[in-house]
Image (spheres, rainbow, N blue to C red):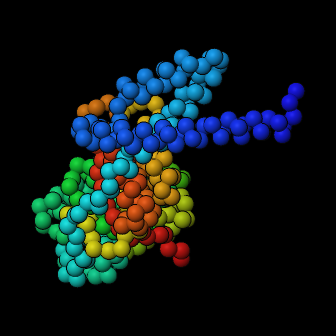
Amino acid sequence: MKDIKELRKEIDAIDDKIIPLFESRMDVAKQVAEYKRAAGATVFQGGREKEVLDRAVDRLKDKGYSNEARDFMTAVMDLSKEVQLKTNPVEQVKRERRPFGNNAKVGFQGTEGSYSQQAAEEFFAAKDNMKAYPAFEGVFEAIDKGEIDYGVVPIENSSIGSVVEVYDLLGKYNCFIVGEKWIRINHCLVGVKGAKLSDVKTVYSKTEALEQAHEYLVKGGWNLIPYPNTALAAKMVAEKGDVSIAAVAGESAARIYGLDVLEKGINSYKENFTRFIVISKMLSDTDADKVSVSFTLNNESGALYNVLRFFTRYGINMVKIESRPLKNNPGSYYFVVDLEGNCNSKDMQQALYYVEKTTIAFKLLGEYVKSAPQEE
């Protein structure tokens, strides 16, 4: 048996042959790119890739290396595709931008006293020119029609996850994420003046709020009924004046609608935060350090990996990925990805350029300054 030093020398000698051949292959890949550009052909041609992989396996003496040979040649072809893409200069797409206005019209989902209103007021540091909309889509429609300049909607909660309806609306409407704000959610059980816990039989609130306070509510044994919004539920309880009904809402809603707080801090998890996004028709004129994009892929092995590797290659930190089903196309999905990094940096521009070139459909969802949950 050969010793390890001798084996390593053999590997070095093989590598000395591989690297010049690798360099030659990349040089030819550049020439292929120039030909394709002149001919108007695309960089990615699935039939050709299959042919190269099959040929690699056919040339093996030991077919036990078939999978490894396919992986090796796939990596080589991926690098060749990157070289081909690099022959075309990356040009930053020019999009219309505007600074945040002092007198902007802002819409939020819910009603007075809702967490969405709190997020809107804290983000814009103002309480004027605010308008409430009963549904998430109403906010998006108002942006689309020009009724408001900005909209504020929740997109994820630290306890129960994503607000999927908002993700779908981002794909449906032509708007951008231009900001985000994390709000600590401190749910309370609120009822009419003079009501006691023993009086309560039915509790109303938004589905997500009922989920976030699930452990407490289950112990109470109450009938739980979903309602469009926490603040709307509080308003309804106040209007009914019935001691047997209560709502899960914030202290501000209880104060606004003249309700008693029957129990504070009923969240299942103490660290309960919701991330709200600010949407607009145009991108904001800010030094953004967070980017959100969506894309659709071919339903084939390795498709997602082939896209995500561009973020790794250019040192872009991916902080969140969400998959959503494509409407009217069962079994197919699109992906939403949040990235950290300067939106104007060369690395970010390169990575997004290659992602767009390697996906079926690509959409920039937003560029904005990242926020973080604030500790008490």
In the picture, measured across the screen, residue 125 lies left or right of residue 61, that is left
Q: How many marks?
A: 0
Residue at screen point 66% across, 39% down: 15
Q: Nearer the viewer, residue 146 or 282?
A: 282
**Residue 26 as seen in the image, left or right of residue 295:** right
Q: Is residue 156 visible?
A: no
Q: Position of residue 198 (x, y in %)?
A: 48, 61
187 with respect to 226 (left or right): right
| Residue 291: quarter of image | bottom left
| Rendered location of residue 169, percent (x, y) | 26, 51
* Rendered residue at 43%/60% (across/down): 347
> Which of the pair 251/157 is nearer the observer?
157
Is 206 drawn above or below residue 280 in the view shown? Answer: above
Q: Quadrant of residue 125?
A: bottom left
Q: Is residue 24 above or below residue 252?
A: above
**Which residue: 60% across, 28% down?**
68
> Which residue is found at the position 79% from the left and 35% from the top?
7
* Snapshot quadrant of residue 150: bottom left
Q: Is residue 3 visible?
A: yes
Of residues 236 and 45, the one drawn nearer to the viewer in this rendering: 45
Please identify the quadrant where the N terminus is shown.
top right
Place of residue 317 in the rendered image (x, y in percent of width and height, measured from the top left): 49, 58
Q: Position of residue 275 (x, y in %)?
A: 41, 63
